[in-house]
Amino acid sequence: MLPPPSLPPGPPGPPGRRPAVLHVVQSADGGAARVVADLVTDQIRSGLRVAVACPDGGGLARCARGLGAEVHRWRAGSGPGPLLLPEVGRLARLVARVRPQIVHAHSGKAGLAARLAVRGRIPTVFQPHAWSFEAAGGVTAGLARRWERYGTRWTDRVVCVSEAELRTAERAGVRARWTVIPNGVDTEHFRPAPDDRPRVRPPLVGDLPESAPLVVCVGRLCRQKGQDVLLTAWQQVLRRIPNACLVLVGDGPEAEWLRLSAPASVRFAGAVTDPAPWYRAADLVVVPSRWEGMALAPLEAMSCGRPVVVTDVGGARESLPPGHALFCLTPPQDPYALATAVADLLLNAPLRATLGRQGHLHVQSSHNARITAEAVADIYRELVP
């Protein structure tokens, strides 16, 4: 789910000139892809020549091309397996052809393949966007931790999106040169609706009475994002607010199971190109994740002036304005606490309005994508003076 680029296409770089950075991404959609799209936007704007290695046909490839970046097709699965060596080989050949000054790898699989392909020959930045061993269990989690400890020898800088993400790595025995750069969002795109314009509800919920509270959850439909916990909590919310409606925005491997277990008041929007209209339409945005580095959805929602309820994982606490944790933060995988927080806020319109205004100002000042991009640029300048 990538919003359209906010810049016109840039001119191609001079023939033979090396790109300043090659971003390596295994997933062409989702949170990491949106972070890369924002970085590419700022880097193109600042005059850098940028290349992106990612699957073809996804939102990131289209967005990066539209911005004027070089886009190189890199086919890779989501996890390690028998195809890892061919994937690393393809990436190594791509790096040799592109000859970037810096390789910036995003998320676990790209971080694994890029560091094996480059092995320290080019300055390498790795940004986990939540650690791979958090998503695994048993032997797989142990192997992922061992790899992350080993892979730091080929990593000039590890960029964590929250202090919590850094502490998770240190508890796992990962030792690296760290920089914490909180996630940012495009505050020009994710902004409140004009004050003089009534809130427009998308067609999927257009038949709801205006008085019906609307809760929106944006994210990939998978175990990490915790929509199953939210559906359990939703039954309790309905006991207090029978006319409330919940919309799950996104798609993923658990979509069919969630549809089968959802009550009639839950609607499924599927994957969308731009979630901003959904944030603006919502009375409350809920992000019930089991683990995160620092989720983008709460930042995007707050940037649109909407209040949020999030689970206390990863950088969630760090992403909230001071004082919001009391109303907006719940323990992970606790349906009762989640239902209580959601229902309490739905029944308190003045508090929601206050939290929405404060959240908007907080994201503007602390989580603007341009601030994030400048901090990343400082790392590049340090690694390649």
Image (spheres, rainbow, N blue to C red):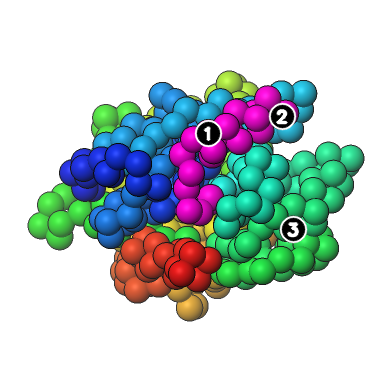
At mark 3, the secondary structure is helix
Residue 84: image tag:
2
Measured from the top left, where is residue 68 in percent x and y?
Answer: 27, 41
Measured from the top left, where is residue 220 in percent x and y?
Answer: 53, 36
**Is 301 left or right of 97, judged from the image as shown?**
left
Measured from the top left, where is residue 245 in percent x and y?
Answer: 42, 39
Q: Say which amino acid is labelled 3.
A: Arg
Residue 125: image tag:
none
Give the class, few, some or many, for how many residues have Cα within 10 Å of label 3's Cα (few <14, many ≥20). few
Residue position marked by numbered label 1 in the rendering: 94
Q: First in sequence: mark 1 or mark 2?
A: 2
Q: Say which amino acid is labelled 2.
A: Leu
Residue at 35% x, 46% y is 17
Give the class, few, some or many, for how many residues have Cα within 10 Å of label 2's Cα (few <14, many ≥20). some
**Is 199 left or right of 29, judged from the image as shown?**
left
At mark 1, the secondary structure is helix
The secondary structure making up most of the magenta span is helix
Residue position marked by numbered label 3 in the rendering: 153
Q: First in sequence: mark 2 or mark 3?
A: 2
At mark 2, the secondary structure is helix
First to last magenta residue range = 84-104
The answer to whether 39 is drawn above or below residue 178 in the figure is above
Say if residue 55 shows up in the picture: yes
**Is 83 left or right of 233, judged from the image as shown?**
right
Q: In the image, is residue 87 part of the stretch drawn in magenta? A: yes
